[in-house]
Image (cartoon, grey):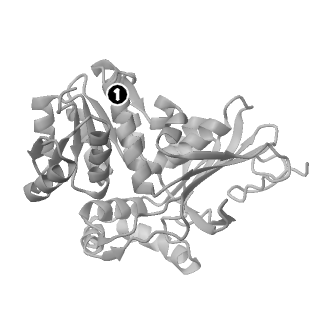
Amino acid sequence: MTADRVWVLGATGRCGRAIAARLTAGHLPPVLVGRDPGRLHELAGALGGKPRIVVTGSVDAITAQLTRHAPAVVINTIGPFTETAAPIARACPPGTHYVDLANELSAVTGLLGRREEAIAAGRCLVTGAGFGVLATESLVLRLCEDRPPAACVRVDAVPKAVAGDGLVGCALAASIVDSLALGGRRYEHGRLVRTRLGADAEWFALPDGTRAHTVGGPSGELEAAHRASGAPFVVAATSAVPAGRAARAVLPVAAVLLSHPVPARAAKRRLARVRVTTRGRSGEFSWARARVRDVDGRTLEGWLRTGPATEFTAAVAAGVASRLVRGEGRPGAHTPGSLFGPELAVEAGGRFLLGRPSLLDGRFTSFPSGKGHPGHASDG
């Protein structure tokens, strides 16, 4: 394999570095793409083997380079994906496959909407190749295997970060603000509807004995769970959004304010300069949970256990790229689980913990209860 089969965009970021290291360890050394030559050379030295470096800044400059060199696979780690995913994917020449780590709802649905275009160009587009999207998606796929149609689904993501200090940064700040500005979303009766940001809050015990608190949000996990299950009622929640009572009261107001360009730009600049200590939630693992209720009223709950979310994300993205280089993909637009199945999560270091169907444990607090409603708890 040549050294320019896979390009990693944003290679010096936390995820970019981890993905580049995974690819190098798998004997698929990537081309390192970024704006800071000093950091790129530092990373190249750490990886060994003298990987090729491409110094480029703006999205327009990146797309020009992609058009000129036509790598086999492009891994985009540059957020916000609401701004970078579409132009970079569009710039990939015919036959160049595209992978990103997006979990913003609009970025994921936007890329999935390019299916026919990707098929015509012979490209495989994969969005959500990380803990965000695949962790919960893989669970839903497993729980829905060989079962009656799903009536309602709830997924919860509880990521654990890698310890370390640093700035939030422009890319992550923009992704956070853009997601907050979108407001809450869920699927009801098969339609994507707006909800109050911070709704669908729930406390629950994790399999390791700790507790988690999640709230609903507009994530790519919502779309992936809907597609994986076909359920008309779907909620996706995360522990990454402030979940306290006071925070949930403020979130809807923040969503309104941040939907306007001037306060949104100011919030992004200020948040980018915040220095944080990312010690993550307590506990050793990251967790994903899914609850699926079928049309017969039976509920099945399952968990996926992984290590730190960044490490799992790096393994997923590198694994998807390696499979695409080997010709295992197919033209079109996909989430990682829909393309390669739930076993991709196991290959990335995840472990499934699946329960048995029950008529007694399936109270879906996410949906209005009532006789005959898919969210109604059966009396057994």
The quadrant where residue 76 appears: top left
Residue at left offset 82%, top offset 37%? 296
Foreground: 241 or 114? Answer: 241
Q: Nearer the viewer, residue 46 or 192?
A: 46
**In this picture, is 251 found above or below 99?**
below
Residue 180 vs residue 345, the one in the foreground: 345
x, y percent for residue 96: 24, 27
Q: Nearer the viewer, residue 175 or 240?
A: 240
- Give x and y (percent) for residue 367: 70, 55
Task: Report if residue 177 is visible in the image.
Answer: yes
Q: Residue at 81% across / 54% down in the picture? A: 361
Please state, as top left, top right, bottom left or bottom right, where the N terminus lies in the image.
Answer: top left
Q: Residue furthest bottom?
A: 246
Residue at disc 1, secondary structure = helix
The residue where tag 1 is placed is 324
What is the x, y in percent for residue 332? 38, 25
Seen in the image, is 285 located left or right of residue 309? right
Residue 114 in sight in this render: no
